Each structure stands twice: as structure tokens, then as C-alpha cells.
């Protein structure tokens, strides 16, 4: 209910702005209020954590100019009138001119780049980016919100047993369910964020779960912002096509000798714009999902990411925030319509006792399905990492992970082969996002097996899709034990990737 559905599901007869529920239907709280939450995060990043002049001062102007020079020179040659002649004429001076532009950019970056626009656009262009950020930094808190229902429900259930023993009336079940659902949600949310400041109670130190994880969350938040939001391509896009693009064009014009025509200067700016693209299209497995676009890497991007030091700066300054300021990263997700979510727990408590009693008999004859269903219901959503294979050589795989090119190697633990053909394989080397992950499912459009039937080794090819998950969080491992259900495993992997219930 916090994050899904991304789009409004139901009959859209009447809705108020920023309200997740309609007359008949629901939209996730975060997608509904994406603009409000994006604005809050943007304010935290731009006002308290990051300084554009400080970040750009770390660029080595001659080195960065040398990296962008080929693209600019080619753009002048291709797009400017008499471009070949101008490219030849400017060749001895172009690096010098670009150094002037980069130094002017370092000096006046706040005048030509709207950092708030770049951050907000990244979140609102694809709301799933905002959803994924909250899910990642609040992973443990969200897991606690789910699992707390078991612990608190058990304790409160003892009281319900006592009531049933003395008042065996059917009406006590939904009433007790409502109380349990409401109280467990309320207590869980309070424990996540309160107390904000550490408080000593006897020998015990009490503080909200989220505030206690400030060092860990700071690292995860900084990594996400640096890799998905404030990337060099997005910053370049903000310069070339943002609200202050005219100011940026004027800055370039002012630092290029007047003898160079405006048409050539415009072609040079276009060369910077070309560094942002072409766009690489990543197609998600479900046809209902829209195309997501992420820019390809360029050597200038790689250098800029290292030099600007956005990830290191954000991580360091997040850890310096007071607990009250730090709480603002995640608490807005729960504060928005918090009472609705808590009341929803009560409503679900009323109906769940009947739904569970109806559902369990249908699963009783199928132990694997029942076990997998229980794992899915208790571990939550969005557990799978997806790799789209572009090439492979045995256990060495190249492909796309979250829109970026990556390579990984698979190992196999013979002791775990009883888990099934899929889950006995794990990532031995590769990107940090896949560290410790096991292979849990896969898909090939033709429907052919992804493993060599004789050797049991992967026989992957371009176009295959692999799904990975952590062993302690992978509901799919329950299905991987039963390789006779590959289609069901793949369908569930796609549902997890989509974040479906």
C-alpha cells in the first residue's frame, strides 16, 4: 500500500490530488505524492548535503577538457556550417578554449545549473526510482513492519485466546483481528522512528530503528543518489537542456573567442549534449511496464563521477546530520496518510481470519505451493535482481543490470545442489548489487531450457533473463527447490520484480 500500485488501480470516478484512495480504487502512497516527497528529498540533498561549486571545483579542467574534446570536435565538423574547415582551424586552440569554459563553469555553476531541477526530474521522470530509493534505504524497517505482525500478533493473540476461552462467540474474532491489526501497525511505526534522540532507560539505550542505522543508511542513500539520480549524464542534460540552458549557452559564448561564429559555438554545445546520449533502452520483462531509459557510460562520465565525489560527499554529510534531520529521509513515507495505513491494518485484521481459513485448505494438498506462498507473504516484495544476458561463456556472463552493462561469474556449491539446479549457482564475482546472490530463476523467450541437460551447466545466450536474490531474503529459493515448476518460478520472479503482492 505504501509503494504499489504505481498507477491508480480501480475505477477512477472521483479522486482528490495527493490522496491515494479514490471512490473505488487505490494508488501507492509514494507514487500518489511523488512530487511532494521528491521535493522534500531534493531540499535535503541541495540545501544540506551537496554544494555544486564545491563538487565542480574538484574537476581537473585540462583533463576533463581533453575527455570531451573529441565529441565537441566531431559535432563542430558535422553540424556547423563549413564545419570541416572550422574543426581544422580550431584544432590547435580547441583544448585551450574548452579549459576556459570548464573553469568558468566551475566558477559560475550555480548560475547555469539548477540542482533542484536535476534531482526532482530524476525522481518524477520515473516514479519507480523514488519507490526504489525508499525501499532500499528503508529495507530493514519495511521488513520489520512486516515481521512485527508475527511477533506482536502472537502476543496479542494470547489475549485473544483467553477471550475465546471465556467468550466463544464468532464476533470476537473480527473484533480481536481489528485490534491486533491496528495495534501492531501503530507500535511498529512508533518503534521505527521513536525516540528520535537516544534515551537511556536504566542500562538500555533506546532509539528509533531508522536513526540507529544512520551510518549504514547514509552509505546506501549516497550510492543510490550518485548512481541513479545525480549521474554525470543527468547533470550534463541539466546544463544543456534544463531551465537555465540559455545561461549555459551564454557562458560558453563568453569564453570562446569572438571570431568564432555563434553557429560553431552552438554546435560545440550540441557536442556536450551528445555526451548525454544516445539513450540505451532497457525493456523490463512485463509488457505492462513502460520503457526505462538510462544513458550509456562515456569515459568523461566515469571521470566526472570520480572527480565530483558526489557519493563520498553525501555519505559523509548524511552521517553528520542530527537524528531529527536524518529522520526526514524516510519518515515522510510513513507520515503521509499514516493513520490510513494503521487503520488499514485494523480492517485487514477483520477480514484476514476468514480469508486465511478459506485459503489454507486449498493449499493443504500441495505442500511446496503452501510453503512458497507463506514465504512470499512474509518476506515482502521486490526481492529479485534481474540481469538481461547479452553474451556468455560457460559460467561467465555479460549483461544489463539496472540499465548498466555488467559482467559476473557464477560458481556452484555441490553441497547445495539439493536446493535444485537453479539455486546451487551463486555469484562469485561481479557488481556489488549482486554480491552473495543466488540464481533463482530464468527465462528464455523460446521456452527452451537454460541448462545443458547432460552436464547441468548453464547454456546461456543473448536475450536470456536471469533472476538473482539473497538466500536469506529470497522467497524464490523455496520454488527453486522444485525445478519441475520452472514456469511458475519465472512468473513469480517477474511478479517480485514488479513488486506485486
Image: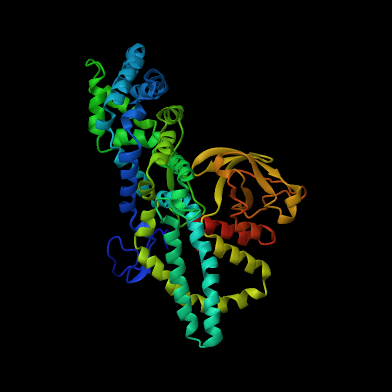
Left or right position of 337 against 217: left
- Residue 297 on image: x %, y %: 46, 33
- Of residue 465 and residue 122, the one placed in the foreground of this image is 122
* Location of residue 358 by image quarter: bottom right
Q: Inspect this view and state whether residue 4 appears.
A: no
Looking at this view, name the residue that lies furthest to the right: 454
Left or right position of 173 against 412: left
- Of residue 96 and residue 351, the one placed in the foreground of this image is 351
* Location of residue 334 by image quarter: bottom left
- Residue 169 on image: x %, y %: 51, 88
Q: Inspect this view and state whether residue 461 appears.
A: yes
Q: Residue at x 31, y 44 (%)?
A: 43
* Location of residue 399 by image quarter: top right
- Residue 267 on image: x %, y %: 30, 26
Q: Residue at x 24, y 35 (%)?
A: 244
Q: In the rendered view, how is the structure colored?
A: rainbow
Looking at this view, name the residue that lies furthest to the front: 202
Q: Residue at x 48, y 76 (%)?
A: 177
- Residue 110 on image: x %, y %: 27, 32
Q: Residue at x 54, y 67 (%)?
A: 150
Count the numbered circles shown.
0
Left or right position of 220 against 456: left
Residue 448 in the image: above or below residue 181:
above
Q: If the image is split into quadrants, where does the N terminus sit?
A: bottom left
Amino acid at each position: 500500500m505504501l509503494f504499489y500500485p504505481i498507477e491508480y488501480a480501480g475505477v477512477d470516478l472521483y479522486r482528490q490530488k495527493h490522496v491515494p484512495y479514490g471512490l473505488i480504487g487505490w494508488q501507492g502512497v509514494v507514487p500518489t505524492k511523488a512530487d511532494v516527497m521528491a521535493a522534500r528529498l531534493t531540499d535535503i540533498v541541495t540545501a544540506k548535503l551537496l554544494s555544486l561549486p564545491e563538487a565542480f571545483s574538484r574537476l581537473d579542467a585540462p583533463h576533463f577538457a581533453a575527455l570531451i574534446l573529441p565529441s565537441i570536435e566531431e559535432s563542430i565538423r558535422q553540424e556547423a556550417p563549413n564545419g570541416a574547415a572550422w574543426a581544422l582551424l580550431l584544432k590547435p586552440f580547441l583544448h585551450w578554449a574548452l579549459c576556459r569554459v570548464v573553469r568558468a563553469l566551475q566558477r559560475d555553476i550555480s548560475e547555469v545549473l539548477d540542482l533542484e531541477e536535476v534531482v526532482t526530474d530524476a525522481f518524477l521522470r520515473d516514479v519507480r526510482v523514488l519507490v526504489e530509493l525508499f525501499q532500499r534505504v528503508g529495507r530493514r524497517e519495511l521488513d520489520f513492519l512486516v515481521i512485527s505482525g508475527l511477533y506482536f500478533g502472537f502476543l496479542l493473540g494470547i489475549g485473544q485466546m483467553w477471550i475465546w476461552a471465556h467468550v466463544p462467540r464468532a464476533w470476537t474474532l473480527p473484533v480481536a483481528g481489528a485490534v491486533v491489526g491496528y495495534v501492531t501497525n501503530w507500535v511498529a511505526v512508533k518503534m521505527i522512528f521513536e525516540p528520535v534522540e537516544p534515551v537511556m532507560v536504566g542500562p538500555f539505550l533506546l532509539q528509533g530503528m531508522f536513526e540507529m542505522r544512520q551510518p549504514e543508511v547514509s552509505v546506501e542513500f549516497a550510492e543510490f543518489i550518485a548512481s541513479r539520480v545525480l549521474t554525470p549524464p543527468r547533470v550534463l542534460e541539466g546544463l544543456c537542456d534544463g531551465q537555465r540552458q540559455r545561461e549555459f549557452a551564454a557562458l560558453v559564448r563568453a569564453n570562446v573567442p569572438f571570431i568564432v561564429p555563434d553557429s560553431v559555438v552552438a554546435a560545440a554545445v550540441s557536442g556536450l549534449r551528445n555526451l548525454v546520449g544516445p539513450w540505451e533502452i532497457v525493456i523490463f520483462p512485463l509488457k505492462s511496464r513502460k520503457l526505462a531509459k538510462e544513458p550509456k557510460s562515456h569515459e568523461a562520465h566515469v571521470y566526472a563521477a570520480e572527480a565530483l565525489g558526489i557519493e563520498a560527499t553525501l555519505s559523509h554529510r548524511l552521517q553528520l546530520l542530527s537524528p531529527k534531520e536524518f529522520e526526514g529521509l524516510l519518515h515522510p513515507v510513513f507520515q503521509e496518510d499514516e493513520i490510513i495505513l494503521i487503520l488499514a491494518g485494523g480492517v485487514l485484521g477483520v477480514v484476514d481470519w476468514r480469508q486465511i481459513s478459506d485459503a489454507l485448505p486449498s493449499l493443504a494438498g500441495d505442500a511446496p505451493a503452501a510453503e512458497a506462498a507463506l514465504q512470499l507473504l512474509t518476506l515482502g516484495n521486490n526481492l529479485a535482481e534481474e540481469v538481461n544476458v547479452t553474451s556468455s561463456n560457460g559460467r561467465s556472463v555479460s549483461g544489463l543490470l539496472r540499465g548498466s552493462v555488467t559482467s559476473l561469474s557464477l560458481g556452484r556449491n555441490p553441497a547445495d545442489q539439493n536446493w535444485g539446479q537453479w539455486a546451487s549457482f551463486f555469484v562469485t564475482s561481479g557488481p556489488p548489487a549482486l554480491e552473495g546472490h543466488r540464481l533463482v530463476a530464468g527465462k528464455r523467450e523460446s521456452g527452451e531450457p537454460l541448462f545443458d541437460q547432460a552436464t547441468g551447466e548453464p547454456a546461456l545466450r543473448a536475450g536470456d533473463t536471469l533472476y538473482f536474490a539473497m538466500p536469506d531474503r529470497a522467497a524464490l529459493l523455496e520454488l527453486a527447490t522444485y525445478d519441475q515448476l520452472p514456469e511458475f518460478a519465472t512468473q513469480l520472479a517477474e511478479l517480485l520484480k514488479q513488486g506485486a503482492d
